[in-house]
Image: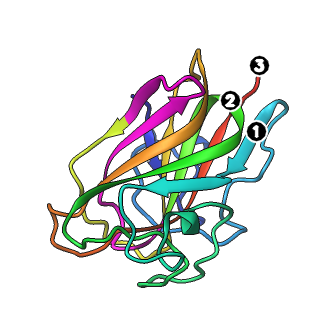
Amino acid sequence: MGLVWLTSACATAPEEADAEPVLIPTSTPTQADLPPEIAQPGEVRQWGISAEAGTSYADPEWGAEQASGEPDTVRCGDFQSAWASSGSDSVDWLEIQFETPVYVTAVNIVQTFNANQIAKVELIGTFGRSQTIYEQIPVQVDQPCPYMLSIDVAKTSVLYNAVRITVDQSVLGLGWNEIDAVQLVGDTE
């Protein structure tokens, strides 16, 4: 399992800090705060092109397809431009497909309501192989949102083209955890 960075434009970059890097729960994302589309040679940063879910509150409002593409929910709250499961106290899943299979180095999940009730994140390969990269009991974050959960991964040895996210809204009693967008980061070689 990789190191999980919770990022913000206000957070001190790890290379600038005097102490060892720590988990930083904070907010993002405006387009300026999000990682650039191409950060270094050979690196691919891509937003999901399609999505499906175990359930959705409505369709197309709050439907799985709301979590594909770049972030488009501009402020926090219960907005129909992000995915929400049908139940506010349930365990459910969202699966995002990406255009280019990559050797994954990171996954970024943009949440816009009652963030971080994400319990599990798995990578799914073109032949259905899966790898768990994040597993945690949901924890309430005391930061403003939109909120981005960034999961750094040691570069995988297999190509992946999908991410499956499990939300567990039964633990904290906050209601719906809404997801606006998911970004897959990696290399093609």
Q: Check whether the beta carbons of the residues at disc 1 and disc 2 lie within 8 A of each other.
A: yes
The circle on residue 102 is 2
Q: Which quarter of the figure is the C terminus placed in?
A: top right
Q: Check whether the beta carbons of the residues at disc 2 and disc 3 lie within 8 A of each other.
A: no
Q: Main secondary structure of the magenta part?
A: strand
Q: Which quarter of the figure is the N terminus placed in?
A: top left
> Is 53 on the left-hand or right-hand side of 32?
left
Q: Determine the secondary structure under disc 1.
A: strand
Labels 1 and 3: the sequence-earlier one? 1
Q: Report which residue position mark 1 lands on.
A: 44
Labels 2 and 3: the sequence-earlier one? 2
Q: Check residue 114 for magenta coloring.
A: yes
Q: Determine the secondary structure under disc 3.
A: loop
Answer few, some or many: residues within 10 Å of disc 1's Cα (few below 14, many 20 plus, some between 14 and 19): many
Labels 1 and 2: the sequence-earlier one? 1
Q: CA distance from mark 1 to mark 2?
A: 8 Å
The amino acid marked with disc number 3 is Glu
Going by the picture, which residue comes out furthest to the right? Answer: 41
Q: Quadrant of residue 182?
A: bottom right
The amino acid marked with disc number 1 is Val
Q: Report which residue position mark 3 lands on.
A: 189
At which x and y percent is residue 26? 44, 64
Answer few, some or many: residues within 10 Å of disc 2's Cα (few below 14, many 20 plus, some between 14 and 19): many
Closer-to-camera residue (7/38):
38
Q: CA distance from mark 1 to mark 3?
A: 10 Å
